[in-house]
Image (cartoon, rainbow, N blue to C red):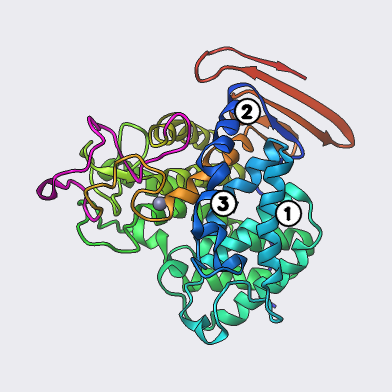
Amino acid sequence: MSEKANLQNPQFVPFTVREIKPQGWLRRQLRIQADGLCGNLDKIWNEIYESRWAGGGRDGWEILPYWLDGFIPLGWLLDDEELKARGKKYIDCIIAGQKADGWLCPCEDKDRARYDIWAFFLVCKVLTVYADCSGDPRIETVLSKALHSIAAHLGGTLFDWGAARWFECLIPVFWLYERTGEPWLLDLAHRLEVLGINYEKLFLHYADQEPQRRWTFITHVVNIAMALKSGALTSRFRGGDPNVFARMALDKLFTWHGTAAGHFTGDECVAGTSPVQGTELCGVVEAMYSYETLISVGGAAEWADHLEDLAFNALPAAISPDMKTHQYDQMVNQVQCSVLPKDHVVFMTNGADAHVFGWGPKSGCCTPNFSQGWPKFALSAFMKAPDGIVSVLPVPSELNCTINGTGVRITAESEYPFRDSLRYTI
Ligand SMILES: [Zn+2]
């Protein structure tokens, strides 16, 4: 047991799909997503329906969990039984594949040491998303065994994506700790922080001001977008101001790599301020999730402003109106969406077609991962404060919750950001 084991409460506690019902344009947007690529990806892409997670022979790493991370809350927010059943089918497969010692990922036992554990962190996070949506009573036990397995596996090293994204595992660790209070979980949190990349030091002495032609984990735009929430997460067991790290990191990122869309470039490592440089769609949705986490843990209004900037600019810019195609890299000053000439590829480490629209341009990450953008945004419309309810985003939404034993219903009627008026009925 650790010397000091406790977990501070977040400033605001997120509500779940049982309490939040998006309305108006936001609900229509989710329906468009369900009718588009996200809602049909398991029908058209063999990396999903033949995934090793589900007993097939294709990807057994991040693709399926990435998709479920958005597809599951989408189905439950829309209360669409068909979508829910398809999501649950894959969760059932993942649970069925759990080994006796708790290991969840589809790899041979002899290959565990080489398996990049980032996907294990991700699937554990997805299980908490599913549990919050469905209330499935199996998840607590599955997750406890899984996190025990991670704790036993870690030993002395993390590498590659696992080292870059260690803090994502804090989300399921905290989720379980809030239900069980078992001290070993906070020992695991400490261990992950010790073994992972130290982003505080990275930004304290920030040396990556120049556009990066060399690919590295510490300049990769998605890792950085995800890491914006790392200081807020660690503040829950280590103490300190949950907002400080993200403010410092963003100050440097916006100075050296900022865009007019309120984001930073990365194609796919940080790429300077030129408006012809791109930024990866995964980085957009991961920054949104980081801001949602920062709103919850840190409680500062500025994170909601950053979140709106991305939701109303960078996110829709990279996805077609029917949500059937998307870009890998978006550019602020994009005047055409055709493949670049071989001798005029502007991107640092991405190819000539990284900015064209398609259902799966470039790598297989953004295609499943952009699914999380709108559902998690919709789930952040309201949060619970110690003394009441916070209206985080002035978007059309309905909240049904219980405060001190009293049922409360709030509707926010709004066309924001298309109109400026907002009407609450409480
Ligand atoms: Zn991506």
Q: Element under label 2? A: helix
Direction from residue 152 to residue 224 in the image, left or right: left
Q: Name the residue under label 3.
A: 42
The residue segment tinted magenta is 320-349
Q: Which of the two labelled residues, at mark 3 and mark 1, occupies the earlier sequence position? A: 3
Q: Residue at x 62, y 37 (%)?
A: 380
Q: Which numbered circle lies on residue 131?
A: 1
Mark 3 is surrounded, within 10 Å at the Cα level, by few (under 14), some (14 to 19) or many (20 or more) other residues, namely many
Q: In which quarter of the image is residue 223?
A: bottom left
Quarter of the image that includes the N terminus = bottom right
Camera-side mark, 2 or 1: 2
Residue 10 on image: x %, y %? 65, 48
Residue 214 on image: x %, y %? 22, 62
The Cα atoms of the two marked residues, 3 and 2, are separated by 22 Å
Direction from residue 159 to residue 238 in the image, left or right: right
User: Please, what is the dominant secondary structure of the magenta stretch?
Assistant: loop
Residue 276 on image: x %, y %? 21, 38
The Cα atoms of the two marked residues, 3 and 1, are separated by 21 Å
Three-letter amino acid code of the residue under disc 2 = Arg
In magenta stretch: residue 91: no
Three-letter amino acid code of the residue under disc 3 = Asp
Q: Element under label 1? A: helix
